[in-house]
């Protein structure tokens, strides 16, 4: 017989084998679930969207509330014009009515069939008529003209809102693009500062330069690291401000794409011609002035009479039938013409006429002021775009010169012919030139967009 401890060992071994197999299965299942979760997360990771300026404008028009309000106002004005046109046409209704009047009774006599109210025609009266009504007056035609002009104003205001949104998107687009490029500049400057710090430390270890050179390089590197952090925060801020107009979730990742070579500014002749035809502010002021004149006409037309015509066909009888019990035909027609001549309204029409004239004079002042302001903006935006475009090449040349200067200065420093201050100055000059180039690009793109918005070409 086997000892008892051997039996216990065998029992324990046999009991632990199933648990070991179960543990292996659970571990395998856990690894499978983890792998599946990782794959699902990778599959669910949002892809970065490439956004051009045109796509940014299209997305912003569907998300911005001010533009949506202006668009709704334009649609409402279009419906108002349709309503005003419909007022010129006859209206038709089919009128059905039953009237009961208490009959007239006399003592010691059978019930009478005459109504007690003399204004009514019978005890039981049935009315079923088709009625066509038309009102003819100068005010109706003026209302159509005013509605059409109001639609023109709403259309111009919609264009103003669209271009205002476009200006906002363009500014945010180029600002975000500039902050991204400035972030690249800050990263390059930080890398350059770290490389120079490493160079000074090696030369200090070789006893070729003083410890002050390494300290100066470290101070510059620390400043460049802070600049890099600030540039990263500014880039994230600009991207979020633009993403609010583009995406339901502002945290959606995206990249901005734009041609590296900006277009040339248009000629002065093209700008002036486009300004006269396509500027929405000028069109809005012109339409508002015309609407004010039509309001004066509408107020004056209140002195004229209105003619109303009515034609009705059907029955108005004591029976709801085409024929009466005696065979008389109940179907018939009636027509009426009404001319209302205004006589006295306690100077109400006169005061409304004065109000409309005040509004007309105000609209004229707004129109002339808009024209003067547009002329000034044309001169300002065209000069800004021209000068900014001319400076782009100079800014690029400055970057190239500063890059070469830094390269040569570092070579001279490595050879012991230049001081650490010269290298630091060359690094600062290159960083300043690169940032100025990005600012100049944004300046030109913004000035060109303002000019295009002014002339209606964007």
Image (cartoon, rainbow, N blue to C red):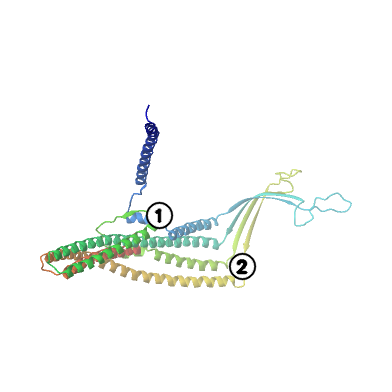
The N terminus is located in which quarter? top left
Which of labels 1 and 2 is toward the front?
1
Residues at badges 1 and 2 in contact (C-beta under 8 Å)?
Answer: no
In the image, 34 versus 291, the foreground residue is 34
User: What element does badge 1 sit on?
Assistant: loop
Q: Name the image quarter holding residue 65.
A: bottom left
Q: Name the image quarter holding residue 417.
A: bottom left
Q: Earlier in the sequence, mark 1 or mark 2?
A: 1
| Residue 82 seen by the camera | yes
Q: Position of residue 219 (x, y in %)?
A: 23, 68
Q: Position of residue 317 (x, y in %)?
A: 72, 49
In the image, 267 versus 140, the foreground residue is 267
Q: Looking at the rendered structure, which numbered label has been put on residue 379?
A: none
At 44% across and 64% down in the image, what residue appears? 287
The C terminus is located in which quarter? bottom left
| Residue position marked by numbered label 1 in the rendering | 249
Dot 2 surroundings within 10 Å: few (below 14), some, or many (20 or more)?
A: few
| Residue position marked by numbered label 2 in the rendering | 342
- Give the side of residue 125 with respect to residue 210, left or right: right
- Give the side of residue 111 with respect to residue 223, left or right: right
Q: Position of residue 399 (x, y in %)?
A: 20, 64
């Amino acid at each position: 017989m086997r000892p008892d401890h051997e039996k216990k060992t065998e029992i324990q071994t046999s009991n632990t084998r199933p648990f070991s197999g179960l543990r292996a299965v659970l571990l395998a299942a856990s690894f499978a679930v983890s792998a599946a979760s990782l794959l699902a997360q990778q599959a669910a990771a949002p892809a970065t969207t490439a956004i051009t300026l045109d796509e940014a404008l299209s997305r912003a028009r569907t998300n911005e509330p001010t533009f949506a309000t202006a668009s709704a106002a334009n649609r409402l004005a279009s419906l108002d014009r349709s309503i005003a046109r419909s007022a010129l046409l006859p209206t038709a209704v089919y009128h059905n009515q039953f009237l009961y009047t208490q009959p007239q009774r006399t003592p010691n006599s059978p019930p009478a069939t005459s109504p007690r109210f003399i204004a009514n025609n019978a005890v039981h009266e049935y009315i079923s008529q088709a009625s066509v009504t038309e009102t003819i007056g100068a005010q109706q035609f003026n209302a159509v003209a005013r509605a059409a002009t109001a639609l023109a104003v709403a259309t111009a205001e919609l264009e103003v809102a669209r271009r205002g949104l476009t200006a906002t998107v363009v500014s945010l687009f180029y600002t975000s693009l500039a902050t991204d490029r400035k972030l690249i500049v800050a990263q390059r400057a930080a890398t350059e500062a770290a490389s120079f710090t490493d160079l000074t430390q090696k030369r200090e270890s070789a006893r070729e330069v003083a410890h002050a050179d390494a300290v100066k390089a470290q101070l510059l590197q620390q400043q460049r690291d802070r600049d890099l952090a600030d540039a990263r925060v500014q880039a994230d801020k600009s991207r979020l401000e633009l993403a609010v107009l583009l995406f339901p979730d502002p945290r959606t990742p995206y990249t901005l794409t734009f041609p590296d070579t900006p277009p040339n500014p248009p000629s002065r002749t093209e700008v002036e011609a486009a300004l006269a035809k396509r500027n929405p502010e000028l069109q809005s002021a012109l339409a508002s002035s015309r609407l004010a004149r039509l309001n004066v006409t509408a107020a004056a037309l209140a002195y004229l009479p209105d003619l109303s015509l009515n034609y009705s066909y059907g029955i108005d009888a004591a029976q709801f039938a085409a024929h009466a019990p005696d065979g008389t035909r109940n179907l018939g027609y009636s027509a009426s013409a009404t001319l209302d001549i205004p006589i006295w309204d306690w100077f109400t029409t006169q005061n409304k006429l004065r109000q409309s004239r005040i509004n007309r004079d105000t609209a004229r002042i707004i129109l002339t002021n808009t024209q003067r302001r547009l002329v000034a903006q044309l001169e300002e935006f065209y000069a800004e775009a021209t000068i900014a475009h001319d400076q782009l090449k100079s800014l690029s040349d400055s970057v190239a010169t500063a890059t070469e200067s830094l390269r040569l200065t570092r070579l001279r420093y490595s050879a012991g012919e230049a001081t650490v201050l010269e290298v630091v100055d060359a690094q600062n000059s290159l960083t300043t030139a690169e940032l100025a180039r990005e600012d100049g690009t944004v300046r030109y793109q913004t000035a060109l967009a303002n000019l295009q918005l002014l002339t209606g070409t964007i």
